[in-house]
Image (cartoon, rainbow, N blue to C red):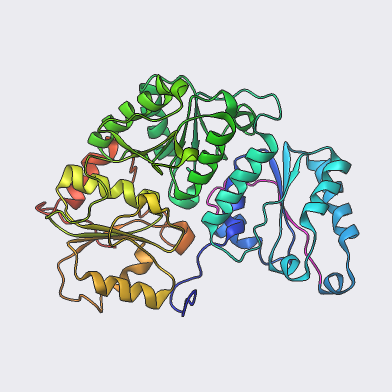
């Protein structure tokens, strides 16, 4: 049955994705809900909250107010709170209850903004879809509200999608920042992580935008449509892809930024070829990417799609793997898919997809998924490489991942753990 989870926890909902984006801004986050929905996105799905609390509030929506209508009371409470704590913006996040009773969240946001003079947004994330839908909606709302509409100091490069909920720890962002700067760019902004609203307000001045998750692709396209800024999808895993990535962003964000289209060499492939809206988009990929028919060891990767794609390139380019399938519980971009890639709809679907692919030499996935492999291939010599995904297993396996999976820093560790002929086995989950 679609969306039925019995053994696994339910995946992080869309308002967790919205919260992940706004957490890194000097924002006020208000959940319009009865008091239980805040815990997931504010604590379990947000690893930064406990060591560094932010301005997150709940309206504590009551049953009587749902029946009789008490919007004025909640608006007054939000306005008074906003005046006390202050912030660059306010994000009003609904829940299933406001959706079911048809609460006019856009209207409430306009009243709050008028009363407080604080820019107020609501992203239409009601907790009924997956977190990546919320990330995408939050970025689009921020672009529509702030991009080019307010004066701001932009960065030369904007990175979209590098949030903790997608395994992006500070060390990974620092490594990607180093690589981008080594390509000749003097400033890098990670949206929703650092810099507040300034990079978003000043984004028309950017030379290039980089989408490192599937959810960041549509916002990058929107920026391309609005301001003509070229964009790249992907990030390097391993030394070989680091060099390709460096050449690609120099190419796309340098001389070709004025030409308005990505004339790519072996370092990348056009994204959405034939579509005018994607003329300035490029996908980081090695030569021959897109074909899943080569010989060599087999691998299965279950994680966020863009991350799975980048790890697939590493396995092929540096370790000689052949067929590598990428599966995910979340959204899939058609231009990133290869033959055999699949979206997982439910637990039963996961077991069927694993079985259909047969035994692999390597399985990379969240540790919570390991029991799904054992009864199918109990005698298989396949190794497991842990990719804890907060959107799937929350905090259960924090600190048990594969380390810094960006750039040449990833090569040494991954080659030792994942090379088929290595004497040292990957650490079992």
Quadrant containing the C terminus in the rendered view: bottom left
Left or right of 425? Residue 87 is right
Q: Is residue 304 magenta?
A: no
Task: Tell me which residue sits at (56%, 40%) in the image.
Answer: 222
| Residue 119 lies in quadrant | top right
Looking at the picture, does residue 350 appear above or below residue 391? below
* Residue 234 percent coordinates (x, y): 38, 41
* Residue 59 percent coordinates (x, y): 78, 59
* Residue 425 percent coordinates (x, y): 16, 56
Q: Nearer the viewer, residue 150 or 256?
A: 256
Give the total of numbered labels.
0
Left or right of 55? Residue 347 is left
Q: Look at the image and tell me whether residue 325 can be seen.
A: yes
Q: Look at the image and tell me whether residue 52 can be seen.
A: no
Q: Which of 424 and 142 is in front in this view?
A: 142
Which residues, given as a range, are shown in magenta? 46-62
């Amino acid at each position: 049955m679609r969306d039925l989870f019995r053994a696994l926890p339910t995946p992080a909902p869309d308002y967790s994705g919205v919260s992940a984006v706004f957490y890194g801004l000097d924002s006020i986050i208000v959940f319009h809900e009865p008091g239980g929905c805040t815990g997931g996105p504010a604590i379990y799905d947000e690893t930064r909250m406990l060591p560094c609390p932010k301005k997150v509030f709940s309206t504590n929506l009551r049953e009587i107010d749902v029946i009789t209508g008490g919007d004025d009371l909640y608006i007054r409470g939000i306005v008074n709170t906003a005046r006390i704590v202050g912030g660059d913006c306010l994000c009003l996040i609904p829940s299933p209850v406001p959706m079911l009773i048809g609460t006019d969240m856009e209207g409430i946001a306009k009243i709050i903004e008028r009363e407080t003079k604080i820019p107020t947004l609501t992203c239409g994330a009601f907790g009924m879809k997956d977190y990546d839908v919320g990330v995408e909606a939050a970025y689009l709302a921020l672009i529509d509200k702030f991009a080019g509409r307010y004066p701001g100091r932009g960065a030369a490069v904007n990175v979209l999608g590098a949030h903790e909920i997608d395994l992006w720890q500070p060390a990974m962002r620092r490594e990607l920042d180093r690589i981008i700067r080594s390509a000749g760019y003097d400033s890098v902004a990670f949206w929703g992580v650092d810099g507040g609203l300034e990079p978003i307000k000043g984004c028309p001045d950017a030379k290039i935008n980089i989408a490192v998750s599937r959810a960041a692709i549509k916002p990058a396209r929107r920026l391309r449509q609005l301001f003509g800024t070229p964009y790249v999808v992907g990030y390097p895993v391993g030394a070989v892809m680091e060099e390709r990535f460096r050449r690609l962003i120099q190419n796309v964000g340098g001389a070709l930024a004025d030409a308005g289209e990505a004339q790519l060499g072996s370092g990348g492939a056009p994204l959405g070829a034939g579509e005018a809206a994607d003329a300035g988009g490029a996908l980081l990929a090695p030569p021959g990417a897109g074909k899943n028919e080569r010989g060599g060891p087999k691998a299965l990767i279950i994680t966020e799609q863009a991350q799975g794609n980048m790890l697939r390139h590493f396995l092929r380019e540096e370790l000689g793997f052949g067929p590598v399938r990428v599966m995910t519980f979340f959204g899939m971009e058609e231009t990133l898919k290869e033959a055999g890639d699949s979206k997982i709809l439910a637990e039963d679907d996961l077991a069927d997809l694993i079985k259909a692919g047969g035994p692999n030499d390597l399985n990379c996935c969240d540790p919570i998924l390991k029991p799904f492999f054992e009864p199918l291939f109990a005698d298989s010599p396949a190794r497991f490489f842990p990719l804890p995904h907060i959107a799937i297993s929350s905090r259960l396996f924090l600190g048990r991942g594969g380390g810094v999976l960006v750039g040449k820093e990833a090569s040494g560790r991954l080659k030792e753990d994942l090379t088929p002929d290595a004497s040292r086995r990957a650490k079992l989950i």
